[in-house]
Image (tube, grey):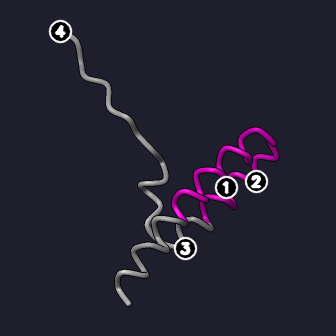
Amino acid sequence: MTEPIHDYDPADSLVDVEAIAVFLADAFDTGDAAHIAEATAVADRARMRVDSIDAVKR
């Protein structure tokens, strides 16, 4: 039986600015430039989502 493949975006798990900060700190701790670049892109997507949710709450 074939299992369905689902898209997963780690930005979905970063629900507030504190979570984003911890995520980025962990990425920077690796010292791996490629990993940091990817984590920064994930954090940017998460930040846009958090900002849009905050705007709706106002």
**Mark 4 or mark 2, which has the lower sequence index?**
4
Position of 9 with respect to 40 (left or right) is left
Position of 38 with respect to 49 (left or right) is right
Residue assigned mark 3: 17
Check disc 1 and give the amino acid type: Asp
* Residue 23: x %, y % from top left: 60, 58
**Residue contact at pointers 3 and 2, CB within 8 angstroms:** no
Check disc 4 and give the amino acid type: Met
Tell whether position 36 is magenta. Answer: yes
Q: Residues within 10 Å of mark 3 (few under 14, many from 20)?
A: some
Counting labels gives 4
Identify the residue at image location x=38%, y=90%: 58
Of badges 3 and 1, the one in the foreground is 3
Which contiguous range is marked in magenta? 22-47
Q: Determine the secondary structure under disc 3.
A: helix
Check disc 2 and give the amino acid type: Asp
Residue assigned mark 2: 29
The answer for how far apart the CA atoms under marks 1 and 2 are is: 5 Å
Q: Does 6 appear above or below 44?
A: above
**Residue contact at pointers 1 and 2, CB within 8 angstroms:** yes
Nearest the eye: 35 or 45 = 45
**Residue contact at pointers 4 and 1, CB within 8 angstroms:** no
Q: Residues within 10 Å of mark 1 (few under 14, many from 20)?
A: few
Q: Which mark is residue 26?
A: 1
Q: Quadrant of residue 21?
A: bottom right
Q: Which mark is residue 1?
A: 4
* Residue 44: x %, y % from top left: 61, 59
**Mark 4 or mark 1, which has the lower sequence index?**
4
